Every structure is written in structure tokens, then in C-alpha cells.
Amino acid sequence: MPLRSYDAVVTVTGPRQDLIVRRRERVFGIWVNRSSKTFIAVPSYLAVSANRPFDTIASPEILHYHRVGLQHSIFLDQSVDQDDPFQTNFINTRILDGLFVAQPRGVSFVSATVFRADIPLPKRAPIGIYKVDTQIFANGRPITENSSTLEVEKVGVPQFVVASSIKHSLIYGLATMGMALLTGWIASVAFRRN
């Protein structure tokens, strides 16, 4: 069977969280938060990859029903509303931060039945359990899907600092305070005027 008859879509979803987006407005020369909108259970990270552009894989109705693509995967109960400035700002900010990624050519077939997907994970991606959904389409119709999980955690020095601050909070606090005092004293000696 030719490679073109199969399409693969890989969706990686980070831990879901509730987020508040605020709109700042100028009131009497001061910038204040005037209005806000709460988004319930949005992914902290979302990457959607496929072997070709999403709109060529299946019809818009099938893509919406099977939650394929960023616009169908962000919100649990609805698609993205292009006319909502809060949603637009939220999504654009996440895309700029690298936390929402759409790769229409991020999946490559190695053979007729084996494919590979490279998912970029920025440094700002939160730790936690990530859900990985794989969907296979043939001739515009889904034929199979699979879900698995992976755990993202810090390693090395960042993990040591986080673990120390949790397990030995008193010692961590005293060490941090001592480093701040030492740094202040060194700065005062270095920049002392005679």
C-alpha cells in the first residue's frame, strides 16, 4: 500500500489547568485590569503533528469530531472562537511562548507502517504527566487511535534545587538568605567609595 494512503496525527497534551486572561485598559492615565475571562481545563502544553496539512487529511467535520489540530484540541467543550479577543490573545501568547505548536509536516513515515514524530518541548513546558494521542487516518477516515502517557520532570541542578526547597525548606531558606547577604556584602565592598 502506498505511503500516501495513510495519515498519522500525533497530539501531545500537557497537564490541564484553569487560567485567567485579563485585559488591561488605561483609566485616568493608569493601566489597570478591567476585564477578565477564565478558561477551564486548558492544556499547559499542546503540540499537534501530522504527516501533511491537517485540512488535507480529512473533512472539517471529521477533524472537529476527532479533535485534530490546535483549534479543536485546546478547549474541551468548544472550538476556538476567532471573534473572542480573550481566546485570540491567549492562543497567540501560547504560540509565541512555544507552548502551543502545530506541525503539519512533523510526522514522517519510515516505512509503510512505521512513522516518527519529533515533538519540540520548550524549557518553559511544565512538569507533569503528558498525554500522547496517536490517530491513523486512511482516505479521510480514522481507522485506529492509541493513547499513552509520558512524564516530564526536571533533572540535574534544577531538580536538586526544587527537591531541596521542598524536602529541606528551612535549610533551603537559610541558605538562600545567607547567599543574599553574602552577595550584598560583596557588592558593598566592591563598590565602596573612599
Image (cartoon, rainbow, N blue to C red):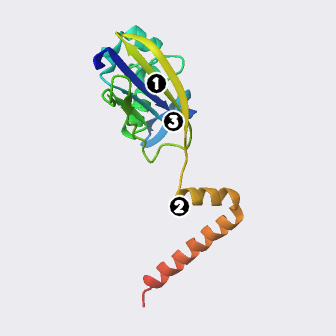
Which residue is located at x 55 percent, y 47 percent?
153
Q: Single out the residue that lies furthest toward the bottom.
A: 194
* Closest to the observer, 72 or 50: 50
Q: CA distance from mark 3 to mark 2?
A: 23 Å
Above or below, 117 relative to 4: below
The total number of labels drawn is: 3
Which residue is located at x 49 percent, y 19 percent?
145
The residue to which callout 1 is attached is 134
Asked which quadrant contains residue 69, the reply is top left
The residue to which callout 3 is attached is 44
* Closest to the observer, 118 or 20: 118
The residue to which callout 2 is attached is 157
Q: Residues within 10 Å of mark 1 (few under 14, many from 20)?
A: some
**Amino acid on which disc 2 is placed:** Val
Above or below, 81 relative to 186: above
Q: Secondary structure at mark 3?
A: loop
Residue 80 appears in the picture as rendered:
no
Q: Residues within 10 Å of mark 2 (few under 14, many from 20)?
A: few
**Amino acid on which disc 3 is placed:** Ser
**Percent of width and height locating residue 95:** 38, 35
Q: Quadrant of the N terminus?
A: top left
* Closest to the observer, 92 or 29: 92
Q: CA distance from mark 2 to mark 1?
A: 33 Å
**Percent of width and height locating residue 158:** 53, 57
Give the mark nearer the N terminus: 3 vs 1. Answer: 3
Of discs 3 and 1, which sits in the foreground? 1
Q: Quadrant of the C terminus?
A: bottom left
Q: Which mark is residue 118?
A: none
